[in-house]
Image (spheres, grey):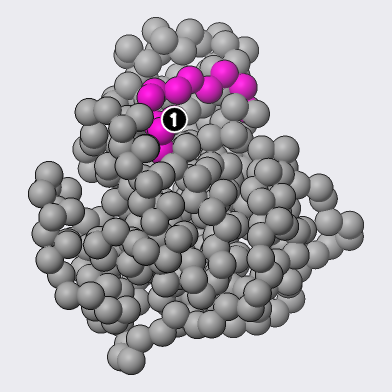
Amino acid sequence: MPADASRVRQLLPSGPEQDLRACVDLMRGGSRTFFAASRLLPPRVRNASIALYAFCRVADDLVDEGDDVQASLAQLAQRLDAIYAGHPQPFIEDRALALVVQQHRLPRPLLDALLEGFAWDAQGRRYHTLEDVHDYAARVAGSVGAMMCWLMGVRQAHTLARACELGVAMQLTNIARDVGTDARMGRLYLPRQWLAEAGLNADRWLANPHCTPALQSVVERLLQEADQLYERATQGIADLPADCRRAILAARLIYAEIGQELRRNGLNPINRRAVVSGRRKAWLLGRAWLAAPWAGRKGTAPASLGATAYLVSACASSSHRPAQALSMSRPLGERAAWMLELFERQAMLRRQR
C-alpha cells in the first residue's frame, strides 16, 4: 500500500454504504480474491466480514511495512480504542469496523490477538514446538474463526472452540503449503523441534532451502495435525445458523484439499505450490451444499485446544446482546471470498512482498 494511502482514504465520503464500498475497493485493488465459499455466506455475515477484513488488511500492512513495530502497534491500539469508544478515526476501515463492533458487540480481545500475531511475524519470532505453532496460528487464524463465528450470532463456547480450531487447521495448511515461499523470505513456521528430530538443522536448512525426505516427513506430520483439527472443527458445524453451514463446510473441505494436493505433489512445497483447481473447488462446493445439513457433532465435544482456550474465554465474558445485520441498499459489485480470504491473509501478503 502506498505510504500516503491513509491520507487518501481520509478524503473519501463518510457513511455506512460508502465505507463498505470503499472497503470492497481496497480489497479488490490490494489482494487476489478467492471466489468460492463466501458465495454461500448470507449477506448479513458477508457484509460484516468485508469491514472486518479491510481493517485487518490495513493493520497487517502497517505492522509489517512500518519501520517501528512497537509504534505501529501502539497506533493500532489507539485506533481500536477509538473504534470501541464509538468515535473511530477518519479512515474508511475504522468507520466500517466501528459499525460492526456496535451492531455485533465484537469482543475486543479477538482483534488484540490478531494484532499480536502480526507483531510476531514482524519480529521474526521462532517456533520450537508444535504448541508454539499452535499459539501463532491461534492468533492469526483462530481469532478470525472466532470472529466469523461471532458475526454469525453464535455464542456457545464449544462451537466457538471448533471455529478457532478450524482457523488453526487452515493456518497449519498454509504453513505446510508455503514452506518454500516462507523460507526464501527467511521465515520458518515448521516446529524446529520436529526438524531436529528428522535430522535437519533449522538454521542451516533455512540458509539453503531444499526438499529432502526429512523435510517431507515434517510437512506430512504437520498436515496430519491439520487433518485432526479439521475433524474436530467439523463437529461444530451443526451449531451454526442453517444459512452459514454450507459456506463453512466448503471452506473446511477446500482448505483440507490443499493438503491433499500437496501430498499428490510428492510433499514438495519448495519447488511447487499446491493449488486446488477450479473444477475441484466446484466439486467440493457441491459436496458441501449436499452434506452440510448432516455435518455436525459426533459424540462428546472435545475441550478447547490449549492455544485457543483464551479466545473462547474472551467471548464468554463479552456481551451477548443480539446483533442487527450490517446491510447495504444495493448488492456488492463482487461477492468475494471473504471468509476464505481472511484465513489466507497472512500467507498471501508475505508472498506479495
Q: How many marks?
A: 1
Q: Say whether residue 253 is visible.
A: no
The residue nearer to you, when weighing 331 against 215, is 331
Image location of residue 229, percent across then percent down = 67, 47
Residue type at numbered disc 1: Trp
- Tell me what residue is drawn at x 65 percent, y 29 percent: 131
Image location of residue 6, percent across then percent down = 18, 54
The residue nearer to you, when weighing 332 against 194, is 332
- Tell me what residue is drawn at x 45 percent, y 23 percent: 125
Image location of residue 97, percent across then percent down = 40, 65
Image location of residue 89, percent across then percent down = 29, 59
Quarter residue 30 falls in: bottom left
- Examine the rendered structure and indicate whether residue 168 appears above or below residue 83: above
Residue 282 appears left or right of 90: right
- Tell me what residue is drawn at x 39 percent, y 7 percent: 204
Location of the C terminus (image quadrant): top left
Badge 1: residue crowd in 10 Å (few <14, some 14–19, many ≥20): some
Is 128 contained in the magenta span? yes
Q: Say whether residue 61 is visible.
A: yes
Residue 34 appears left or right of 148: left
Residue 90 appears left or right of 294: left
Q: Which residues are magenta?
A: 118-130
Is 218 contained in the magenta span? no
The residue wearing badge 1 is 120
- Tell me what residue is drawn at x 56 percent, y 67 percent: 105
